[in-house]
């Protein structure tokens, strides 16, 4: 075994082993409660809101996210926090207030199935196949990232790390389905609070607080908006590109249509719980930069040469763990990273399994099988998905920037689907073929824009922002144009799934803390305040 950055003690290894054992035990205990397709794929639609809210946020908080965003903090400064604030909070609130009622009322089992109800089978098929491919590629990227991380930190072999992590994910997802994934995502959240948040607290203490930190990093690195007026800022994008490309298209496309996160809200116990799921998550999301971006800033202050020579920005968090943590705490920090990776991958695999089983296998291969047969297929798809993800993990090794690659994938697939959803949910005149051709043209244009239009952007981030914007514009234009010359569905078929086709539910009789609208306003106020503080 080669030397790693850390040398774990017996106590550290014991903490790691306990987590692995816990993950497997959860899967075995939940197996007896996972008998029907509704149990396996949707957690019986019975989970309380605080669980689905944490899971909604945690599904996007894998090891790649934590390592990649802390690296971004060290490289770009607080400007990187836009991915969490304007790139998440407004979209999460919009999802809860305006889109979740249609998702939940439709009783769709997946996002592609909703598209079938709103448009037609062809639109569902395009989205299902595109989502399945993207999800397995992202799972492979995450798997490779975690294997590389364990090799760097602990000296474990890359192949051994990949296979061990994949097998554990395979076992607990195959046994307990979505419920296993969600419970491990909740566990991951608390492990991150215990294992990684202390790095921020200890680092700020040693640097003399926020003011001491800002004094030791480059000018402007402590601000999120201040440098966006200049075209040569570290992010390489103007405020217009950030607002339109990231804040509107990329953000809304991911948080409102990506089944990986939407599936968590589908598991809520009723419509109100489903609506407040992403809003609860937004309250947590606004503070996540404290365990990602700020850690990167601390690493830059403590290790001024990070990012130069052999010291990669990706080592921002690991270097601080090694510097500040004693025996036992190192094991807790490593376990938090492993938990975040595995629950992130489990989220991708459980989402893939649902879409494969209901939107591809049942739709095109075996339409009239029993519920038990589809549960069996779901477990088999879990095995197949993990195997494909392992293979895809080695493809990820060929890409220089994993985070940029993931954002590129999202601009290819999520931006077009958002354009279709926005028209489909809020415009009754949108037709089935308007949805289909809007989606197909958006995906096609994304590939054309990326491979054949010779436009140079200052950074990959800037390219992804503007590509997402123009892909959305093309998708919307084609969807509207085709809808104006084709026949829409009767209003009776759109009840419960399109605004204006049925009565919107009101929560006026409930206490303020149970009303999605009030909670959304409070979250938006916190979002505005935090952006003013870090302007």
Image (cartoon, helix red, strand yellow):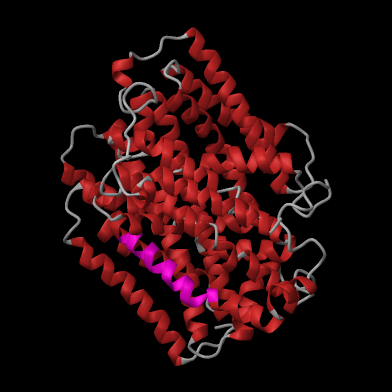
Determine if the magenta segment contains residue 191.
yes
Which residue is at the front of the view, 148 or 417? 417
Residue 151 in the image: x percent, y percent? Answer: 56, 75
Residue 163 in the image: x percent, y percent? Answer: 44, 67
Residue occupying image coordinates x 22% and y 46%: 38
Does residue 438 appear in this view?
Answer: yes
Magenta region, main secondary structure = helix
Determine if the magenta segment contains residue 233.
no
Give the quarter of the image for residue 305: bottom right
What is the quadrant of the C terminus in the image? bottom right
Residue 369 in the image: x percent, y percent? Answer: 18, 37
Left or right placement of residue 303 versus residue 35 in this view? right
Q: Which residue range is magenta in the image?
A: 180-197
Residue occupying image coordinates x 59% and y 37%: 249
Residue 457 against residue 47 in the figure, above or below:
above
Does residue 400 appear in this view?
Answer: no
Residue 402 in the image: x percent, y percent? Answer: 62, 56
């Amino acid at each position: 075994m080669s030397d790693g950055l850390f040398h774990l003690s017996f106590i550290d290894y014991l903490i790691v082993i306990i987590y692995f054992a816990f993950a497997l035990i959860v899967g075995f205990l939940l197996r007896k409660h996972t008998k029907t397709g509704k149990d396996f794929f949707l957690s019986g639609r019975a989970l309380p809101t605080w669980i689905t809210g944490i899971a909604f946020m945690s599904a996007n908080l894998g090891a790649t996210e934590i390592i990649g965003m802390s690296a971004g903090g060290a490289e770009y400064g607080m400007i990187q926090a836009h991915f969490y604030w304007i790139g998440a909070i407004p979209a999460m609130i919009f999802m809860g207030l305006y889109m979740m009622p249609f998702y939940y009322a439709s009783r769709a089992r997946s996002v592609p199935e909703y598209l079938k109800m709103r448009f037609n089978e062809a639109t569902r098929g395009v989205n299902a196949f595109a989502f399945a491919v993207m999800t397995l590629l992202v799972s492979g990227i995450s798997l490779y990232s975690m294997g590389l991380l364990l090799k760097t930190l602990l000296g474990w072999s890359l192949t051994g790390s990949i296979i061990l992590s994949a097998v554990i994910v395979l076992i607990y997802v195959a046994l307990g389905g979505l419920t296993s994934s969600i419970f491990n995502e909740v566990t991951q959240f608390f492990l991150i609070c215990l294992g990684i948040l202390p790095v921020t607290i200890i680092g700020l203490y040693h640097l003399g607080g926020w003011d001491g930190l800002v004094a030791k990093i480059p000018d402007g690195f402590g601000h999120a908006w201040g440098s966006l007026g200049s075209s040569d800022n570290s992010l390489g994008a103007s405020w217009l590109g950030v607002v339109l490309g990231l804040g509107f298209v990329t953000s809304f496309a991911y948080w409102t249509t990506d089944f990986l996160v939407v599936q968590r809200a589908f598991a809520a116990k009723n419509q109100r719980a489903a609506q407040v799921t992403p809003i609860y998550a937004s309250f947590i999301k606004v503070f996540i930069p404290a365990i990602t971006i700020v850690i990167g800033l601390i690493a830059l202050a403590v290790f001024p040469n990070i990012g130069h020579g052999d010291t990669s920005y990706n080592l921002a968090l690991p270097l601080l763990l090694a510097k500040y943590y004693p025996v036992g705490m190192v094991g807790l920090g490593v376990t938090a990273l492993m938990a975040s990776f595995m629950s992130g991958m489990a989220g991708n695999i459980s989402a893939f399994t649902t879409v494969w089983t209901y939107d591809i296998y049942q739709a095109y291969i075996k339409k009239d099988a029993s519920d038990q047969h589809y549960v069996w297929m779901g477990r088999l798809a879990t095995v197949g998905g993990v195997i494909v993800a392992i293979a895809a993990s080695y493809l990820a090794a060929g890409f220089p920037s994993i985070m940029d690659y993931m954002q590129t994938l999202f601009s290819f697939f999520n931006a077009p689907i958002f354009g279709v959803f926005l028209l489909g949910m809020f415009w009754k005149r949108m037709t089935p073929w308007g949805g289909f051709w809007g989606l197909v043209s958006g995906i096609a244009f994304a590939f054309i824009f990326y491979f054949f239009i010779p436009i140079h952007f200052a950074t990959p981030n800037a390219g992804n922002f503007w590509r997402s914007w123009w892909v959305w514009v093309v998708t919307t234009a084609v969807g509207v144009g085709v809808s104006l010359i084709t026949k829409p569905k009767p209003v009776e078929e759109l009840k419960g799934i399109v605004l204006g086709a049925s009565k919107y539910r009101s929560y006026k009789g409930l206490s303020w803390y149970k009303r999605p609208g009030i909670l959304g306003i409070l979250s938006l106020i916190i979002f505005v305040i935090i952006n003013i503080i870090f302007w």
